[in-house]
Image (cartoon, rainbow, N blue to C red):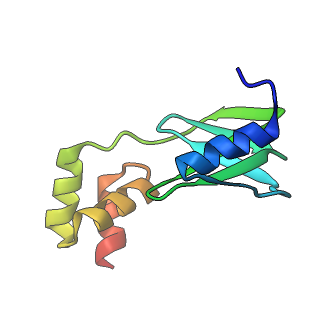
Amino acid sequence: MMRSGNRDMRRMLDTMGLEMKDLGNVEEVIIRTENKEFYLSKPQVIEMKGKDSTIFQIVATSIEESQRETPSIKEEDVILVMQQASVSKEKALIALTESKGDIAQAILGLTT
């Protein structure tokens, strides 16, 4: 573990080719997974830029977690909507998501 602090950490980041910057005044960070959403209020966000990638370090004291309501959409439902409405897979997925999985409603929304 480093004991000499921030200066040594910056030297190490420089040798690795990373540039570190505090984004400051971030109000909220939202992380969405397939089943959950995490709301981080007033976090400290550090951005570390490298040659090929960017890393964000987030430190928050207040975290709220909630379940996401995502309808399970079957592949055959998407194919049916694609065929009946003559649309792309992306449009069929959006329509099914907006209609909460209702196939007939999705087709009607795309054809009218």
- In this rendered view, identify the residue nearer to me: 89 or 18: 18
Residue 88: which quarter of the image? bottom left
Residue 110 shows in the view: yes
Q: What is the residue that sits farthest to the bottom in this orientation?
A: 112
Residue at 66% x, 34% y: name it. Answer: 66
Q: Position of residue 2 (x, y in %)?
A: 73, 25
Task: Give left or right: position of 78 versus 96.
Answer: left
Residue at 32% x, 44% y: name it. Answer: 73
In the image, is residue 16 above or below residue 26? above
Residue 5: which quarter of the image? top right
Residue at 43% x, 57% y: name it. Answer: 52
In the image, is residue 106 above or below residue 71? below
- In this rendered view, identify the residue nearer to me: 108 or 31: 31
Quadrant location, the N terminus:
top right
Residue at 77% x, 33% y: name it. Answer: 63
Residue 26: which quarter of the image? bottom right
Task: Give left or right: position of 96 versus 74.
Answer: right
Q: Position of residue 69 (x, y in %)?
A: 53, 40
- In this rendered view, identify the residue nearer to me: 74 or 15: 15
Task: Give left or right: position of 9 versus 104.
Answer: right
Quadrant location, the C terminus:
bottom left
Q: Position of residue 55 (x, y in %)?
A: 57, 48
In the image, is residue 109 above or below residue 80? below
